[in-house]
Amino acid sequence: MPIDRVPSRQALIEHLLHTRIAGDVATTRENNLDHYRELARGNRYYWLGLEFGDRWTDEHAVLELMADRCGVVANPGHRTGQDTISPELTVDALERLAIRLRKAAAGKQCVLFATGHPGGLLGVHQATAAALRAAGCEIVAIPEGLRADDGRLLQMGGVAMVLRGAALVHTHSPEPMATILDAMAAAGSPLPDLVVADHGWAGCAGQRGIDAVGYADCNDPALFVGEAEGTLTVTVPLDDHVAPHHYDPMTAYLLDAAGLLG
């Protein structure tokens, strides 16, 4: 993944707004509120591998948290149309993520990368994996022959994902991460020091007590709730399905802040 130059914080904010990675994003208000409601009703699909018990049964509390941590419109009376992600919150979270990546590099830690959104975020994860590998980290090689989520688990550039037929799969399921971690435990392999992922891949790892960081869209509240409860270390708010090259400046900013650009 080519990274041409590192933007300033303000330049990155402007880029996020221009490309709609943040700001006025494509995800609708109706979709966001529906997902917040389903999380509050206990629909496990929207919990992304996390367990909330009866702690988040009020959809208005979920909305309040999402306004605070993601930057969606706080007004509960706003029911339709446009919703937002705060680019400042996106960059703030990237800077927190950079601190964790710097720690991983300093300790030559074992890191597992995975994505349920390969159409958007694969390049971000691959570039981060390559930078940590160059810094001396061990990037986890997943056991061969694993299947989950009606597909085969594979890695590209150090990033685990699901292949179904000939297509890389967009999945929110925690099942693939659970399958990998169970296989590692059965083989007696040490579990990762850090998981860098998204969707159920990140949620499952965090729920199992592994230090996990993730990227999440404004219609995926579970990872933000997980961070609020301390189950996830960092959740970065962004639209997770824009053209992949639009994430390049964001990735450059992240890796530079982590001290991983040589």
Image: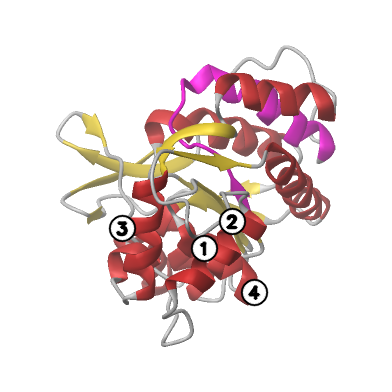
Rounded to the nearest angstrom, the CA distance separating label 4 from label 3 is 21 Å
Question: Which tag, 3 or 1, sits closer to the chain's start?
Answer: 1
Residue at (54% x, 17% y) in the render: 245
* C-alpha span from label 2 to label 4: 23 Å
* Kind of residue at badge 3: Ser
Q: Are marks 3 and 2 in contact (CB under 8 Å)?
A: no
The disc labelled 4 sits on which kind of residue? Gly
| Mark 1 and mark 4: Cα distance apart in space | 18 Å
Looking at the rendering, the stretch of residues picked out in magenta corresponds to: 235-257
Q: Say if residue 183 shows up in the picture.
A: no
Q: Position of residue 151 (x, y in %)?
A: 19, 47
Callout 4: few (<14), some (14-19), or many (20+) C-alpha neighbours within 10 Å? few
N-terminal of the two: label 2 or label 1?
1
Looking at the image, which residue sits at the far top? 4
Disc 3 secondary structure class: loop
Q: Is residue 258 left or right of residue 206?
A: right
Residue at point 34% right, 63% down? 46
Q: State the quadrant of the C terminus.
A: top right
Residue labelled with disc 2? 74
- The residue carrying mark 1 is 63
Q: CA distance from mark 2 to mark 1?
A: 7 Å
Between circles 3 and 1, the one closer to the viewer is: 1
Q: CA distance from mark 3 to mark 2?
A: 28 Å
> Which sits earlier in the primary sequence, circle 1 or circle 4?
1
Looking at the rendering, which quadrant does residue 229 occupy? Answer: bottom right
Residue annotated with mark 4: 230
What residue is at 69 percent from the left and 47 percent from the top? 137
Q: Are marks 2 and 1 in contact (CB under 8 Å)?
A: yes
**Residue 78, percent across and down?**
47, 51
Q: Identify the amino acid type marked 1.
A: Leu
Residue type at numbered disc 2: Ala
From the image, tell me which residue sits under label 3. 173
